[in-house]
Amino acid sequence: MIWALVGGPLLLSAAFMLAYSVGLTGLLAHGLSFAAWATVLDDRVTWISLGFSCWVGAASLGISMLGALAVLALRPAPVARSMLTPWSLPIAVPPMVAGLSAVLWLGNAGALARAAYALGWIRRPADFPSPIYSTSGLGIIVTQAALVLPFLIVLFDRLSRVHRLGALDEAARTLGASPSLAWWRVRVPLLLRSAAPTLGIYFLALSGAFEIPLLVGASYPTMLSVRVVQLSGRFDLSTRPQAYALALLYALGVAVSSAVARRLRTSTPRTERI
């Protein structure tokens, strides 16, 4: 019953997208046709958007992982519950608010640009090296990493408690390992192995994000989610089947990746799960 309630709407949505993309329904439906799929798969922008989305997702996740590990490295013992409160505050920030905050703080007319101008570091606010609207996706990466960092700090802290990594570090040092060797050979591999399924889900979420890329991303290249909205929102209705084809293609990729993540989850020993 639960699977029907959860999966039913998803299957109906996928069926509608498939029917629309092959010309079986919609305002411009003229019978079965795979022209939209051929256009999407042959379009160079599609693969650029896909690669850009993967790059932004991987970079955002990588930076936030390094930040979370750095927090644990500076405080090897599990973080006290009272210490989790400041790190947990950004969890309540919606992506839309985070994107607007990034524009207000990091833009050429933002708070940091005005502060640098007031201090005489730059000649005018427009000279501020803003990561916003960068073709490399730096503004998206910085903003998304700042949002994900608190989640990973809480996740890694909980894993540290579950696995009692402090005791494992002591055991490794007793056997002759240096503190750095115990960190890289004991703590980090165990954390990453246990968190692998969750990190995979985060990668999919960051790669398919929409609000932050829309607000702080460049007009080209765009994330795959933004590309779908661009195709579906044009006045030219002939591009709408392409939007559904692209959305369905991304959904299939997410489904396959989720199945792999679930497989990793089930293959992980029960004692390593959080």
Image: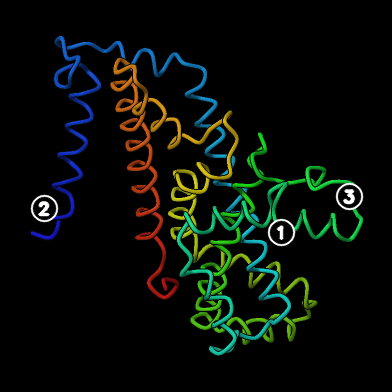
* Whether label 3 touches label 1, CB < 8 Å: no
Residue labelled with disc 2: 4
Element under disc 2: helix
Which badge, 2 or 3, is on the more N-terminal residue?
2
Q: Residue at x 47, y 56 (%)?
A: 95
Q: Residue at x 39, y 18 (%)?
A: 40
Instruction: Identify the amino acid type marked 1.
Output: Ala
Task: Report whether 1 appears left or right of 133.
Answer: left
Q: Residue at x 80, y 60 (%)?
A: 115
- In three-dimensional space, the C-alpha distance between marks 2 and 1, rounded to whole angstroms, equals 49 Å
Classify mark 1: residues with Cα within 10 Å, few (<14), some (14-19) or many (20+): some
Which badge, 2 or 1, is on the more N-terminal residue?
2
Which badge, 3 or 1, is on the more N-terminal residue?
1
Instruction: Identify the amino acid type marked 2.
Output: Ala
* Whether label 2 touches label 1, CB < 8 Å: no
Instruction: Identify the amino acid type marked 3.
Output: Ile
Give the foreground label among 2 and 3: 3
Which image quadrant is residue 10 in?
top left
Task: Report whether 55 appears left or right of 229.
Answer: right
Residue 212 x %, y %: 51, 48
Element under disc 3: loop
Residue labelled with disc 3: 122
Residue 205 x %, y %: 44, 50
Residue labelled with disc 1: 111
Residue 154 x %, y %: 52, 75
